[in-house]
Amino acid sequence: MIERILCMAIHISLTLIVFYGIKEKIRAKWHKEPFYPYLLSCMDHMAYLVLILPRAFLLIIFI
């Protein structure tokens, strides 16, 4: 039970980080502001983790 809750918290936090990075990228493009490089690299790594590795596969591992 604790592992399942922890796993869902990890997935939700990774997904929120990716969505926040995409939102920041769009906002920077609309306002013609420089996009923060550390946020871009963070978003790319998190997007790789969340999108390339399916979440169902991680759920099977953790549960």
Image: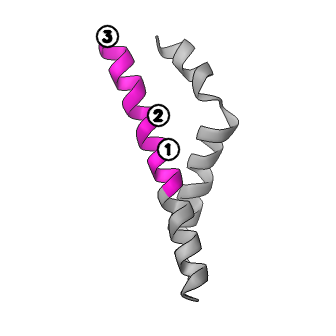
Identify the residue at horizontal 56%, vertical 13% (top origin). 60
On residue 11, which mark appears? 2
Q: Which residues are magenta?
A: 1-19
Q: In the figure, residue 41 lies in which quadrant? A: bottom right
Residue 9 coordinates in the image, percent (x, y): 37, 32
- Tell which circle, 3 or 1, labels the residue nearer the N-terminal end: 3
> In the rendered structure, which amino acid carries the disc numbered 3?
Met
Report the side of 11 relative to 28 (left or right): left
Q: CA distance from mark 2 to mark 1?
A: 6 Å
> In the rendered structure, which amino acid carries the disc numbered 2?
His
In front here: 37 or 50?
50
Residue 58, compared with residue 29, is above or below; it is above
Labelled pair 3, 2 in contact (Cβ < 8 Å): no
Is 32 within the magenta? no
Identify the residue at horizontal 50%, vertical 44% (top origin). 15
Placement of the N terminus among the 4 image quadrants? top left
Residue at the extreme left of the image, as rendered: 2
Please tell me how crowded label 3 is: few (under 14), some (14-19), or many (20+) other residues with Cα within 10 Å: few
**To which residue does mark 1 refer?**
15
Report the side of 18 relative to 3 (left or right): right
Dot 2: element: helix
On residue 63, which mark appears? none
